[in-house]
Image (cartoon, coloured by chain):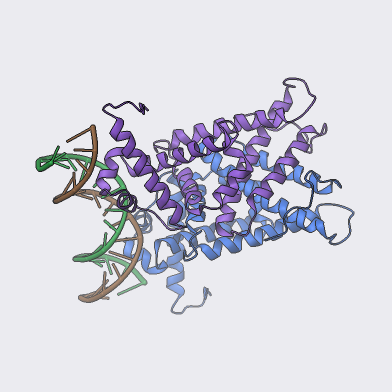
Chain colours: A blue, B purple, C brown, D green
Amino acid sequence: MTTRGRRGPYAKSAAKRQLILDAALAAYADAGTRGVSVKDIAERAGLTDAGVLHHFGSREALLTAVLEARDAAAAERYGEREALWRPEMLTDNAGTPGLVKLFVDLSAAAAEPEHPAHEYFTERYRILRQRLSEALTADRSGTEPAPAGQRARADWAARVLLAATDGLQLQWLLDPSIDMAADIARLRDTLLAALDDPTPPGEGEPPAQA
Amino acid sequence: MTTRGRRGPYAKSAAKRQLILDAALAAYADAGTRGVSVKDIAERAGLTDAGVLHHFGSREALLTAVLEARDAAAAERYGEREALWRPEMLTDNAGTPGLVKLFVDLSAAAAEPEHPAHEYFTERYRILRQRLSEALTADRSGTEPAPAGQRARADWAARVLLAATDGLQLQWLLDPSIDMAADIARLRDTLLAALDDPTPPGEGEPPAQA
DNA sequence: GTCTATAGACCGATAGAC
DNA sequence: GTCTATCGGTCTATAGAC
């Protein structure tokens, strides 16, 4: 957190953490689909495994930091608000199956409430759903500010679009011939059209929740 | 494979395998979201871990068999064709987060081509996509057999619906307040409506692939 | 055929020296 | 802040008892 350029007790530490993170990113990037151990990362960074764990506390905390670093990189590229759900992200991801696999692995492991990545993931999805829901309603032209039930419909669309994105990455890991970006772009368009449609397909409104 | 009721060289073996599978199912069912080791399963089955592995060869092969057993149980309940993509499945799954987590874990690990579950997953998705695509076109009333580009659109809808199902389970692991079955049922209806719509949202046809 | 006992390899975590 | 050493745990492999 105190990662100022000033010199101080954490200056060297922060630099070393970054070095380790870069090593981990590289390790996962070219691990293809194979597993990555703390030792693998340590060797790339020129340390022992104990040295690496000293900086992050645990393997899982380190991996969580890797995903955060990846999100930060995406935010820098595509902008804070839209970065994480743009179809371009899927095209990028298609280049690094190792990181996609890490994401899926960790998100399953993070279901455990005590897992260091638990809060990261719950918060990530909460924010993504919210931003995406807003973006989906904003794209719709010529309507009043917040027409009651439309908010719930947009929330549903956001949940479903994010879910399809994650699930499609899973299918893509098993069958790389799938064109994730194209499939998702089309789904986004379909959902937008459905939001405009005055007569929704199901009977009532979608369930209103997180 | 040769699991006839007749007595023979494999009769006892098959029964023991089933006993171990049941133990594993139970272990994952009440593990909640925590991890399960071979030893945990072995203790439930009244064996040592080595004894368990004797019947399945490796931990990963055992876990693959667990998922197959789960699919078989679902097929018996809901019928061979529809079992694996019916919304009711999601309601069932909501009762066993451990098994959902196992599914996500394994499907990521199975991206590795050498993984014992690799073929199981690739084949599972292939069949599911095909059946679901057929079901989606069959539900549409009053059209000709196979109108060219509509086939590609149904394939796309099947990919996306399956993906959303998997991805929603991921979000649900992190936030159990999500109503998976309701969200998916609504998406299915929306996709069906989109397939009937003569003017698709995107410009061209969806990518035609697996 | 079935299972146990045992030993090895690997991994993550931790304590302590420097 | 980093390394060495070590420990507990998990999976794997094998030899042999039943």
Residue B173 occupies quadrant: bottom right
Q: Nearer the viewer, residue A75 or A154?
A: A154
User: A44 or A172, which is in the foreground?
Assistant: A172
The answer to whether residue B202 is above or below residue A55 is above
Task: Locate residue A61, reporting x and y percent.
Answer: 45, 64
Return the x and y of residue B171 as percentages of the image width and height. 59, 54
Instruction: Tell me where residue A79 sits by quadrant.
Output: bottom right
Is A153 or A100 nearer to us in this picture?
A: A153
Q: How many marks?
A: 0
Q: Is residue A91 visible?
A: no
Residue drawn at (52%, 73%) of the image: A3
What is the residue that sits farthest to the top in this orientation?
A: B145
Residue at the outermost front position = B6
Q: Quadrant of the C terminus of chain A?
A: bottom right
Residue A129 visible in this rendered orientation of the protein: yes
| Residue A28 percent across, percent down from the top left | 45, 50
Residue sitting nearer the eye, B57 or B46: B46
For the point 61% across and 44% down, the residue is B88
Is A49 above or below relative to A202?
A: below
Q: Is residue A9 left or right of residue A89?
A: left
Q: Residue at x 56, y 48 (%)?
A: B92
Horizontal side of residue B145 vs B180, given as left or right: right
Q: Residue furthest bottom?
A: A8
